[in-house]
Amino acid sequence: AMAWRTGRGMADDDVAPWSTMPTWAMHEVAKHVEKACGAPGLLAMSCCCRNWRTVVVEDARTLSHLQFRFDCQQHQGAQRGPQAMGRKYRRVPGFAHVQSLPLLLRNAWRAGNPSATAHVAEVMEWNGDVVQALRLHLEAAKGGQRRSMVRVATAYYHGEGNMAWDAEEALRWFKKAVGGYHQGKMNGTKQVENENGSFVDRHGAMDEKSHAQNERQDVKLQAQAALMLGFMHLDGEGTKTDVAEAVKWFKKASSHGNGEAQKQLGVLFNTGQY
């Protein structure tokens, strides 16, 4: 529909073009679209016309808590519309790759949204800027993004970029990644834990397919972090050697479907180390 009703009546003279809708009313419509469709719906709105784009991409409340999901490794060219949230990115030199991101994502990143920050970090790293990417991953990790926690922990474990080798810091971040919060607190946005132990933004909405994909990715990240904790306790890296503690973490990783953890448990049991 390209028109809206200006009053409570249903007469034809109560109908006016979208372009005449006051900003406060557009913000209210955006809230309902976000609850029903999440970030893809808001992005579609931002592609309709300048007025909607201004409302969506400049609203601090909206930008602060949106969740983003896309693949930065296989850019298929610029797209407009709701499918753009899943668009894929190609390598480009320098910082130009940031400008190729959707405006909604860029503004959310600049507004301090941890989910957007994590995605920008991934794009930067994929384009070769590891130091800047790790700096952003650290910001996102502090904001509760599990994949950024794992990336930061891995960087400390290997001594990558501007992060010197630090086994204790790696251990701390791996434990956070296995811990009980996923998206974390974002600029005051409350996160609600569901019965499966995952956390969902109380302001947003997510379709069933996207939610399932996020759940699978979250479980995979937990398993990866638990596996590393198992090896670090087994080898005494960043902590004292503790086989029993290592087995606990290997079991956790195995329960999430990690094959390497299952093999390691078999080795420990078959060799009598536990």
Image: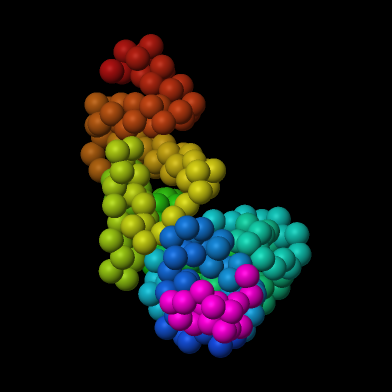
Picture layout, residue 73 above or below residue 12: above
| Whether residue 269 is visible | yes
Closer to the camera in the image, 11 or 168: 11
Instruction: Classify residue 136 as left or right of residue 175.
Output: right
Q: Residue 45's spot in the image, x, y percent?
A: 58, 71
Count of numbered circles on the image: 0
Magenta segment, which residues? 1-17
Q: Residue 24's spot in the image, x, y percent?
A: 42, 83
- Name the image quarter holding residue 149: bottom left
Picture layout, residue 244 above or below residue 106: above
Q: Residue 190's spot in the image, x, y percent?
A: 28, 61
Quadrant where the N terminus is found in the figure: bottom right
Closer to the camera in the image, 175 or 241: 175
Residue at 73% over, 68% down? 78
Quadrant where the C terminus is found in the figure: top left
Picture layout, residue 209 above or below residue 53: above
Picture layout, residue 54 above or below residue 197: below
| Whether residue 109 is visible | no
- Name the image quarter holding residue 159: bottom left
Residue at 45% over, 42% down? 215
Instruction: Classify residue 50 as left or right of residue 31.
Output: right
Residue at 67% over, 66% down? 81
Is residue 2 in the magenta section? yes
Closer to the camera in the image, 46 or 193: 46
